[in-house]
Amino acid sequence: MKNKKINIVLCLSSFIYAIQFYINNKITPVGDQTAFLEYAKEFHYNYLFFGIDRYFTWSSRLLIESATLLFSVHEKLFIAAAFLATLLLVYALRKLTPSLPWMPALLIFIFLPATEFLSAGSIPTYVNYIFPASLLLFALFFRESKNIWINMASFLCFLVAIMQEQLAVYAFLWLLFETVLAKKDKNPLLGNLCYLALSALGILSAKLSPGNALRLEKNIVSWFPNFPNLNIFQKLGLGFLETGDNLLSTSFAFVMVFLFVLFVYALHKKNVTAIALSGFVMFNIFSQKMGWNTIFGTLTGISKAARESGTFSFNITYMSAVAFYGLLLLMILYALWLVVSDFREKLWLTYLFVIGLIGRMVISLSPTLYASSTRTFLPLMISLFIITCRLLYNLYTEYQRE
């Protein structure tokens, strides 16, 4: 009976989450949504051929592009696919909270909010970001299942997910960690190495795609004319300023929730250093949101100046901003490290935070750094989602034992 109630909660949450994107699309069918309806007519509704064509003319995402076209035309089918993908996601993440299986189904509304995935049209943005992310997490958590059908489904889900370049990088780094651990524990490596190789191929495909090269040229003209004049360090500098500004100065709701949970867990652990570090960061973000004069106001101004100038100068002003954002992120990481007791878990959770940041920083290498909006924070959203689930679960189990 208990399992039946849990399944009802998971199904209901998944449906409500999925239907948001359909409703948003009906309210504001903007961006790529309207364009894709025209593409469907142009390609005579040949969805697979459209994906192949896009690989050579616009994007390396191939099957994701095909799915975007399909779901833009067949919106009812989109609801079913989004519901199924969300269900796969919450069933995968329930492994993080065994005795609280409903928790990920509720937190998904905070850490993957539909309102942050609207910029290119609700359905196209979902299909290009949350849909492959859902498939990726299902694959990562179930790829070693003893059920051959689940194993095959995980493999297929993984193949689709790594066509999204940020997720290919994220998957590669995730699997690299697990492969190292498996080698250390003297466990079989073949499965991890196969998935690791596939994620590497996903990255290589994105790099070699003729469509991505053509898209880069067009995006430079449209969004960032000075982009070719920047070296790799300037691009990373601009990306880090933009990431720090959005993550800490402006700050999203999911960041605030994560920091609050971290602070509460630090209180529970009675770790003074972790309380001070997480509390300091949280207080400064809160102060900025209240309109008080804080260092974040200055940092936002520096980030804005860099954005408007289209370049990153290696001067005291810009380097100080980078250093301060870096220091705040290190404070968060150290607080996280201090509160988690199990060594392997603290290593895994801090690593997850880092690869989430790296996944976001990939956008630094694109001229759409400032145009892509919140959706490119997806890898970091995933990491903070997982970390928060684990912290809340640890908090719950420790209170239960006490």
Image (spheres, rainbow, N blue to C red):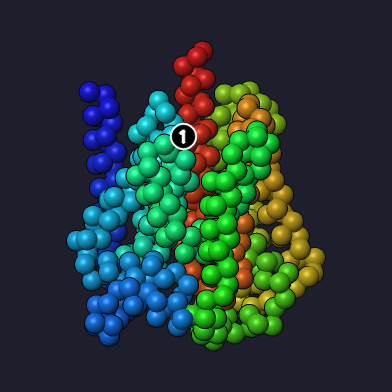
Left/right of residue 185 with respect to residue 50 in the rendered view: right
Nearest the camera: 254 or 210? Answer: 210
Query: Is residue 91 in view?
Result: yes
Name the residue: 68% across, 48% down. Answer: 328
Image vertical order of residue 312 relative to residue 19, above or below: below
The residue indicated by pointer 1 is 96
Crowd band around label 1 with a 10 angstrom C-alpha radius: few (<14), some (14–19), many (20+): many
The amino acid on which the numbered mark 1 sits, given as a three-letter code, is Leu
Nearest the camera: 148 or 157? Answer: 148
Image vertical order of residue 243 relative to residue 65, above or below: above
Query: Is residue 121 in view?
Result: no
In which image quadrant can residue 131 be found?
A: bottom left
Q: Position of residue 64 (x, y in %)?
A: 39, 66
Name the residue: 42% across, 60% down. Answer: 160
Q: Position of residue 65 (x, y in %)?
A: 38, 71
Q: Position of residue 10 (x, y in %)?
A: 29, 38
Left/right of residue 318 with respect to residue 203 in the rendered view: right
State the SS at label 1.
Answer: helix
Name the residue: 74% across, 56% down. Answer: 323
Check the picture and name the quadrant holding the N terminus: top left
Name the residue: 26% across, 24% down. Answer: 2
Nearest the camera: 241 or 174? Answer: 174
